[in-house]
């Protein structure tokens, strides 16, 4: 038997199958060790066949399998083919998405521990004769084990000493055996409250029994999570499994807690915040069929779970579901493939669906389901729009409006909780000299440095490089330095000045670097009243705290002025999602939205929670201006440490694209070469070509564009194309 093996080397010249002589137990999807050149490396069996087109005498044999079970299921192998074709990526890059990286590199394996089984075949008196009369430790150990059957060897060694335990093993009183110890991610398991479904919820649960792609449009607090859990229970009752995705790692502890309370050990979790050992063990539990439900962030869509009965993507609009690094993929596309492969339902849930998804639901590609009311019939929190220009003209130059400060005071007075949303971490987003205009920038990136006051440092949020905080301008020596737009650190500092006796917590990228930091912060917030939680997008969605009665949006305009056709959509989504954290139980909620553009139409729609009116305006604008979903955007990004080299490649690609444009002249809406908005990251100069094409012939044109890009894969440059990128920076 011949095995078609792809070796684990990410190089375009090697990204193809090689024939090897299979072992008697070789299986499709198996991870194997194979000879390659003058070394042995890891590979994957993609197929088995009877004969090879090569001379069999020249073929090498597989050395050995690396796992008991094939790492790649038949479904995974089909999905890999789909991704290679549709995402224009290398086969080995697609394969790597399915297997924990440390497992691939051989850095993590099963954690085996020694257990000791008690074997008392003789009486206690007979055993004691084998020891000296003054052997105190041996007597104590014998007394300790006489009523129990099994112990961890480490436990007994710590109590009685290794030599004592080893003597008992030597005498066969204790029999050593190895067993796997699971490294299970910790989570607080709350008491399960199975809420009776409302009529609207039950109708949704009934409808999703029929395999289809569903867009569940439900306001915040409408009970989407309960719908998800009932739908998963229906799948389990049929002997099937489930995948549940959330957008933020910060949401997984809360979701895992709720799901473990309902489904117990049937739940496994997968996300990048796990340790290598935890991720390996959870992956193994899933692959072996010991877990029936996978909960996790984007990467969990590649879980090796089989016989899937339902897939759920919560907060489906969130940009984190699109991978912006190699290999690039859209989670929705992978979920749709898996749903069709398993003939099961896919639920895309959101209070603020993406314009593209809602358009597909309106045109019949998805089936639209709605939950228009909160489960407790509580009114949506009132959103009060505060004009910060008026605050300045009346003498208030602080970052908080008088309205927000008054409402925080009232919230504290009644021992309730406040959440303040700031769409930027750090103390301020830039440092400028008032005398000469010098702007502190990263030496490796074309980006302003962000001042972090607690660390007394300037940090680059692109490459992570750190600099000592400035006291004087390095250009002119002036001490008149101005800090830019506010971040979470500054908001916390000013709150502590205003409310010194109140517990104030901060949740952003900087405060959640340590393991389990997300859950610790959320747990402390849950248990503290009154309390104020300041955070970035991590706090904007999914969290359910019954005592949050006030939400403040410190600067709603931060996402509004990006040079991106989705900036207004993202602003609407953020405002609505953040607002939804207030008034989720029996307490009335309120939202204070601070803006310098109070007359912008997005705030009018958001204040009224009128998504449908917002969608109607936005979709008309997209259609008129020919943007997605009525067109496709392709971005080609070229980067190199040698600026002229990057320019030469960009120029050549531009020439080829110009020739392609002549072939499809009526399909091209826009085509331009330019510097990337962030012109340098990590010492690499960045240029881009932005192309916008009509939907007609788009697949054919995209394939030709990728063929052009593949011509310019060079050792000293990075060249890649992405479709409808979530960020143009």
Image (spheres, rainbow, N blue to C red):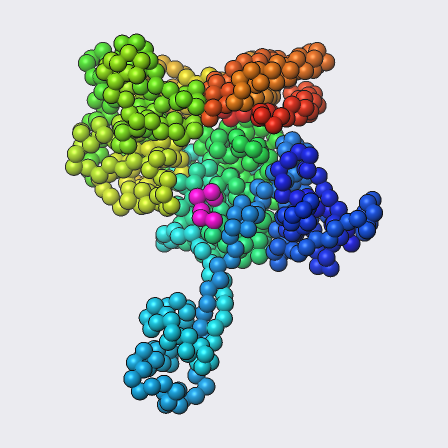
Residue 291 showing in the rendered view = no
Residues in magenta?
Answer: 271-276
On the image, the x and y values in percent for residue 343 come to 64, 44
Residue at the image position 55 percent from the left and 47 percent from the top? 105
The answer to whether 59 appears left or right of 422 in the picture is right
In the rendered image, the vertical position of residue 251 relative to residue 607, given as above or below: below
On the image, the x and y values in percent for residue 436 come to 30, 9
Residue at the image position 45 percent from the left and 79 percent from the top? 170
The answer to whether 308 appears left or right of 420 in the picture is right
Decide whether the magenta segment is chiefly helix, strand or loop. loop
Among all residues in the image, which is located at the extreme top?
Answer: 436
The answer to whether 516 appears left or right of 470 in the picture is right
On the image, the x and y values in percent for residue 260 come to 43, 53
In the rendered image, the vertical position of residue 33 relative to residue 356, given as above or below: below
Q: Nearer the viewer, residue 677 or 7?
A: 7
The answer to whether 639 appears left or right of 38 in the picture is left
Q: Nearer the viewer, residue 186 or 118?
A: 118
């Amino acid at each position: 038997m011949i095995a078609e093996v792809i070796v684990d080397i990410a190089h375009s010249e090697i990204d193809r199958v090689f024939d090897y002589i299979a072992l008697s137990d070789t299986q499709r999807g198996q991870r194997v060790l194979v000879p390659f050149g003058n070394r042995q490396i890891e590979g994957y069996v993609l197929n088995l066949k009877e004969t090879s087109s090569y001379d069999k005498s020249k073929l090498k044999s597989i050395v050995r399998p690396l796992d008991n079970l094939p790492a790649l299921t038949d479904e995974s192998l089909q999905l890999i083919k789909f991704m290679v074709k549709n995402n224009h990526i290398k086969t080995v890059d697609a394969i790597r998405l399915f297997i924990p990286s440390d497992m691939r590199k051989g850095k993590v394996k099963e954690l085996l521990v020694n257990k000791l089984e008690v074997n008392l075949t003789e009486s206690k008196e007979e055993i004691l004769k084998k020891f000296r009369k003054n052997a105190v430790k041996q007597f104590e150990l014998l007394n300790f084990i006489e009523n129990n059957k099994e112990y961890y060897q480490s436990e007994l060694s710590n109590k009685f000493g290794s030599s004592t335990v080893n003597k008992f093993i030597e005498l066969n009183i204790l029999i050593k055996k190895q067993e796997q110890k699971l490294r299970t991610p910790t989570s607080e398991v709350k008491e399960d409250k199975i809420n009776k479904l409302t009529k609207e919820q039950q109708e949704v649960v009934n409808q999703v029994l029929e395999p289809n792609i569903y867009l569940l449009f439900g306001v915040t607090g409408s009970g989407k999570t309960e719908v998800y859990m009932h739908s998963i229970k229906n799948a389990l009752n049929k002997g099937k499994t489930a995948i549940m995705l959330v957008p933020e790692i910060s949401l997984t502890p809360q979701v895992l807690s709720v799901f473990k309370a309902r489904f117990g050990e049937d739940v496994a979790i997968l996300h990048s915040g796990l340790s290598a050992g935890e991720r390996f063990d959870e992956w193994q539990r899933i692959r072996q069929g010991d877990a029936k439900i996978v909960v996790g962030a984007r990467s969990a869509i590649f879980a090796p779970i089989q016989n899937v009965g339902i897939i759920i993507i919560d907060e489906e609009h969130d940009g984190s579901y699109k991978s912006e690094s190699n290999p690039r993929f859209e989670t929705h596309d992978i979920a749709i493939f898996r749903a069709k492969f398993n003939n099961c339902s896919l639920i895309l849930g959101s209070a603020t669906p993406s314009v593209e998804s809602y358009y597909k639901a309106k045109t019949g590609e998805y089936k639209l389901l709605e939950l228009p009311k909160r489960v407790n019939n509580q009114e949506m929190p009132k959103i009060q729009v505060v004009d910060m220009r008026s605050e300045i003209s009346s003498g208030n130059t602080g970052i908080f409006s008088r309205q927000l400060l008054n409402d925080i005071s009232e919230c504290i007075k009644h021992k309730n909780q406040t959440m303040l949303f700031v769409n930027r971490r750090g103390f301020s987003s830039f440092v400028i000299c008032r005398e000469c205009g010098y702007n502190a920038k990263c030496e490796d990136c074309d980006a302003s440095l962000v001042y972090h006051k607690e660390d007394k440092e300037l940090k680059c949020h692109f490459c992570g490089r750190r600099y000592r905080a400035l006291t004087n301008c390095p250009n002119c020596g002036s001490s008149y330095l101005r800090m830019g737009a506010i971040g979470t650190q500054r908001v916390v500092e000013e709150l502590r000045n205003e409310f010194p006796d109140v517990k104030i917590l901060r949740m952003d990228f900087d405060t959640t670097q340590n393991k389990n930091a997300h859950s610790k912060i959320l747990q402390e917030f849950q248990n503290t009243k009154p309390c104020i939680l300041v955070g970035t997008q991590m706090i904007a969605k999914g969290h359910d705290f019954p005592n949050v009665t006030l939400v403040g949006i410190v600067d709603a305009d931060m996402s509004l002025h990006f040079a991106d056709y989705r900036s207004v959509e993202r602003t609407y989504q953020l405002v609505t999602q953040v607002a939804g954290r207030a008034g989720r139980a029996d307490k009335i909620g309120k939202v204070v939205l601070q803006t310098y553009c109070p007359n912008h139409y997005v705030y009018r729609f958001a204040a009224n929670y009128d998504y449908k009116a917002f969608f109607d305006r936005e979709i008309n604008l997209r259609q008129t201006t020919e943007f997605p979903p009525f067109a496709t955007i392709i971005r080609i990004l070229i980067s190199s440490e040698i600026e002229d080299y990057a320019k030469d490649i960009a120029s050549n690609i531009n020439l080829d694209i110009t020739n392609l444009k002549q072939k499809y002249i009526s399909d091209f809406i826009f085509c331009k070469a330019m510097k990337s908005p962030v012109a340098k990251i990590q010492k690499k100069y960045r240029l881009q070509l932005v192309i916008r094409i009509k939907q007609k012939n788009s697949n054919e044109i995209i394939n030709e564009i990728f063929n052009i890009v593949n011509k310019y894969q060079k050792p000293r440059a990075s060249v890649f194309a992405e479709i409808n990128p979530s960020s143009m920076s």
